Image (cartoon, grey):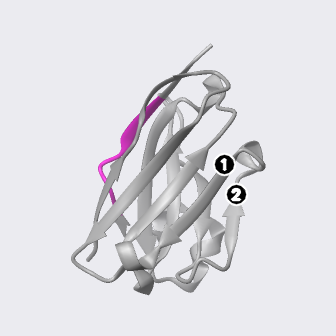
């Protein structure tokens, strides 16, 4: 099991930027495919961005394409989500998650077994 801790959330105005970090401990991060998910009040958890173990393959949900970038630094055991042009609709708790499953690219939360505690992102209009 890998322990994940998110940071970098906060309150930002629409059009602004934030960078979220997900620090891993307990296991080597390079063994895992990683994902960023979010959950807004009253809504289901959805995938935002996914990255494979080596960082050579990424996927994004349509609503964030061109605005968000997922990356990883395996030497630092950290995954990042850089968010630009933030919109009020991006307001949610953001979670990072890890999996070793080959189905990682589906973006289904149930494919990810290890989760962080989440970090709140609030975008004001």
In the picture, the quarter occupied by the N terminus is bottom left
Question: Is 78 left, or right, of 91 in this rendering?
Answer: left
Residue beneath label 1, please? 68
Q: Position of residue 33 (x, y in %)?
A: 51, 76
Q: For the residues labelled 1 and 2, say whether their Cβ atoms are less than 8 Å apart.
A: yes
In the picture, the quarter occupied by the C terminus is top right
As drawn, 35 above or below 27: above
Callout 2 environment at 10 Å: few (<14), some (14 to 19), or many (20+)?
many
Q: Which mark is residue 50?
A: none
Pick whichever, 61 or 121, lies toward us.
Answer: 121
The secondary structure type at the circle numbered 2 is strand
Q: Position of residue 89 (x, y in %)?
A: 64, 27
Callout 1 environment at 10 Å: few (<14), some (14 to 19), or many (20+)?
many
Tell me which numbered mark, 1 or 2, is placed earlier along the sequence.
2
Residue at screen point 52% across, 81% down:
53
The secondary structure type at the circle numbered 1 is strand
Residue closest to the far front: 75
Residue beneath label 2, please? 60
Region in magenta = 115-121
Residue at screen point 33% across, 62% down:
23
As drawn, 40 above or below 38: above
As drawn, 30 above or below 2: below
Q: Position of residue 84 (x, y in %)?
A: 66, 39
């Amino acid at each position: 099991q890998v322990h994940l801790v998110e940071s970098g959330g906060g309150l930002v105005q629409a059009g602004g930027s934030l960078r979220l970090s997900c620090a891993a401990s307990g296991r080597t991060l390079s063994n895992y495919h990683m994902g960023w998910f979010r959950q807004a009040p009253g809504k289901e958890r959805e995938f935002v961005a996914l990255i494979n173990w080596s960082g050579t393959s990424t996927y994004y949900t349509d609503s964030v394409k061109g605005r968000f970038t997922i990356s990883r630094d395996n030497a630092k055991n950290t995954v990042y989500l850089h968010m630009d042009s933030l919109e009020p609709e991006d307001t949610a708790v953001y979670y990072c998650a890890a999996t070793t499953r080959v189905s990682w690219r589906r973006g289904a939360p149930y494919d990810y077994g290890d989760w962080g505690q989440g970090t709140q992102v609030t975008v004001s209009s």
